Amino acid sequence: MGAEQPNGASDLRGGQLRVRDIWALGVGIVVCGQYFGWNLGLENNGPVAMLIASLTVCLLFLAWVLTLSELTVAMPRAGGPLDYGHRAGGPWLGFLMGWSMFLECLFGGVATALAGGKYVAFLIDPNNPPDNSIAVAVGLSIVVIFFLLQARGVKEQARALVLMTYAAILGLVIFWVVSLTNFSWDRVWATPVIPAEKGWQAVLDAMPFALWWLIIIEAAALAAEESHTPARTIPRGLTWAILTVIVLVVFTTVTACGALPFQQIAVKDDNPVDYPLAEVIRQIPAGKSPLVFYGFGVVALFGLVASYHGLLYGASRQVFAMGRSGFLSPALGRVNEKRQTPVPALAACSLLTAGFVLATLWFKEAIEMAVLVAGFAALVLYLLSMWSLFRLRRREPVLLTGYRAPLGWWLPLCVVLLSVMAVAVYPRIDKNGVVVPLGLGMYAMGITYFALCGRKRVTRIPEDVAPQATPPVELPARGFHWVAVAALAVALGVMGVVTVAAFGGPDLLGSPNDVSAVGVLGVIVVAIVAVAAVELWQTRSGGDDDQK
């Protein structure tokens, strides 16, 4: 969100971030999604359905970050989704896109703060259900600590994010190694391979939870202003980040479900498990060692809160941009003169998060609710962003010449179809009937405020934003291009068949079995590899940029 700076501040220092930096930023933002949230998709669905859903979501995010790169490379100093929508469809679309990203970050932050609290409560008394009052107290402490840290300055928060990201990766490595001591493939690939009573419906029911693996990775795409040759650095770095996260997703899912029956990872005493990796380690023989159990727990906790750090940053910068542009109260667009940090926006986001954390004293499934609301807002953002891209490609084609996502219209189409597929599942998985009304209620509140107060204050977006002057990229051979198109089309077709079957239509794939499950997984993996290969070929360089 490079342009979200106070009036009178200098531009961010450009040309500093290389492919490796964008890769690290992308992985660091989402690595803590490995620690909780995703496991809730295992309940009544199973590991294989979760793997199919997770890889489908990875394909969605690969298409999403590459198409988003078109917008962020074209408008590197814009205020992120807020200004993309404003330019494409006017202030109303700009508000809806900015509000969607704010809600995505806000509820993601609520879920992460609560999960941190649950981890601490679990470590204090691992043999009993976590004390909710302890979890809330720790969650509020996380909110306060990170408000103070981010209000202090960018340099301090950047150092903290790097250290916590390293801790998150170290925690995953520890988990994989320990889990393998109790691993059984029969727990992962059970019989039936997908629960017979649900069939292919299990795949779709797991998708909203699978979003948590990669949610808010788009924040890394908004670093174009600080990147060296954004047309190459942003899409190439994010492609490598997605491929890296896919490896993490597969390792974490397989080792967790291989070490412990999947239902025990999702539900315990009729309550959602909010600390799945720690629960796995507690229940296996190797975890009986206090050194292993508490050693992992402490490392995981420090890693876990890294995502809260990033989510608060994203939410506060979006609120700051909306306040500065008049979409929200101008008071939210101010910065601290000494620290040059958006303290009012940080305070507003922290207070809202604290309020939702306190509400969990009366609502035991708050983390699941927050994860799903964050995913719902993210899907709305993806759909609105694709509409903006469609409109700008037709209305201002010169604007988007700095970088074009490969495969023409196929990647935006992929984002739209898979996002609609995931949104359609929400009414069915909203067990308490809270997620959809809460999500729609938050949109209604924002829209009402904007209609009554914000619409008249909106300032004009900069018209001098132009594509970056970048060297031409070499497009892949035409045959290579069409192979990727074919692979993507087949994957979308297969998932379309799965969706039809899940909603009661004809089951063209038949009941899930070993062959059909492997086939669906294979088709999705081939599509991911093909799209990534085309992108990496298109943005390859004969120089030594990757090493810088």
Image (tube, rainbow, N blue to C red):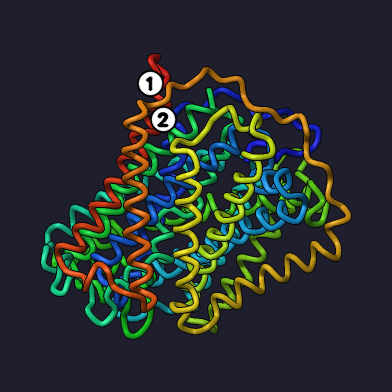
Quick one: 391 or 529, which is closer to the camera? Answer: 391
Numbered disc total: 2
Identify the residue shown where x is 26% and y is 60%.
253
Percent position of residue 233, x then y: 48, 28
Counting other residues with Cα less than 10 Å from the Cα at mark 1, is it few (<14), some (14-19), or many (20 or more)?
few
Q: Looking at the picture, which amino acid does disc 1 mark?
A: Gln
What residue is shown with label 1? 547
Quick one: 151 or 176, which is closer to the camera? Answer: 176
Quick one: 401 or 283, which is closer to the camera? Answer: 401
Secondary structure of the residue carrying tag 2 is helix
What residue is shown with label 2? 20
Identify the residue shown where x is 72% and y is 38%.
5
Q: Are marks 1 and 2 in contact (CB under 8 Å)?
A: yes
Can residue 83 be seen at all in this image of the molecule? yes
Quick one: 245 or 354, which is closer to the camera? Answer: 245
Q: Residue furthest top?
A: 543
Percent position of residue 329, x then y: 81, 56
